[in-house]
Amino acid sequence: MSDKKKPKIKSKMHPRNKNRERYDLKALILAHPELKDFIKPNKHGDDSIDFSNPKAVKVLNISLLKHYYKIDFWEFPDHNLCPPIPGRADYIHYLADLIRENNFGRSPEGNKITCLDIGVGASCIYPIIGITEYNWNFIASDIDELSIKNANKIVSNNTKLLNKVNCKLQKDSKAIYQGIIGSKDKIDITMCNPPFHESQEAAQKGSLRKVQNLGAKKVKKAELNFAGIQNELIYEGGEIKFISAMVLQSKTFKNNCFWFTTLVSKQSNLNAIYKKLDQVNASEIKTIPMGTGNKVTRIVAWTFLSKSQQNQWRKDRWN
């Protein structure tokens, strides 16, 4: 297929996503020359990236962050999960839309929004995008001390991020909000990309499928970049158990947060999540479809605030 026949717009992505258009490889190489070593013709004869190669994907992401987001430093250990930038950006953009809906279609001034990222990871990717796109403030939690240390290193080495991210170590692996949200804290929106495998075996199978779907030759074991460290991808009981715990624990902080949100990778989990939300008497629930490339996912958002409480929140914090 020639370039002229290929769609330039990735229509599934959010309209404000900087990567809706096909990658401008020349511009990305200018931003990060190392990328040139990972570009080769695809089966159509066009210059492309080998997306089954973890090193290539990481270098591409560094290039995207340098070119589109003006991030100078983005380094983390190879055994940590390497997040795809376009998909992570979509989550942030849809959260911005959710806040706009509660503010008469207007974006509150960025520094008036505080977002809690549950499980920030070593890459610190959601705070990076949320700050560079919307100037939000972030609380970033993780149960892994080394991930928090690396996220802090990324923040301290990028002027744009300084004084915008408060990285907090979650010392209780069973707690999600407790120990992170103070009794007087106000969080406008929370976000989470939960671990979705219930075991190491399931994680390895998922990683193998991902590599093979990307057109790589048959392999017996996926490389670590696609597996991530255990707490990034694995939780006993899988995604549904983690989100169920998140829903139950969120009620304790019902007056501290406007919107609680999470990604839900498996559509089959939605009914169980809705039942949990009914059990805790969430006052409003929204499901936002989201998809990049062949991947389809969704955001589930809930709040405990009544309409009058929502109006008061908007007056006190956003106007």
Image (cartoon, rainbow, N blue to C red):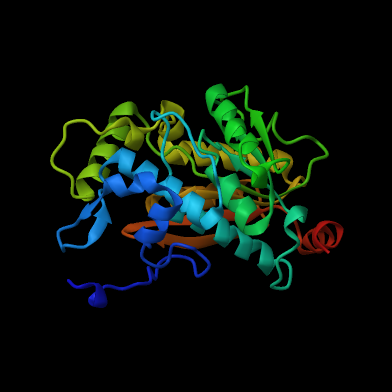
Screen quadrant of the N terminus: bottom left
Screen quadrant of the C terminus: bottom right
State the image coordinates of residue 19 (x, y, percent, origin top left).
Answer: 44, 62
Compared across the picture, whether 20 is left or right of 140 comes to left
The residue drawn where x is 60% and y is 42% is: 117
Find residue 101 and report its image quarter: bottom right
Residue situated in front as seen by the camera: 136 or 57: 57
Say above or below: 74 vs 307.
above
State the image coordinates of residue 46 (x, y, percent, origin top left).
Answer: 21, 62
Compared across the picture, whether 314 is left or right of 171 comes to right
State the image coordinates of residue 98 (x, y, percent, origin top left).
Answer: 63, 63
Residue 176 visible? The answer is no
Question: For the view shown, which residue lies furthest in the bottom direction?
Answer: 4
Residue situated in front as seen by the camera: 316 or 284: 316
Tell me how many marks there are: 0
Say above or below: 275 vs 122.
below
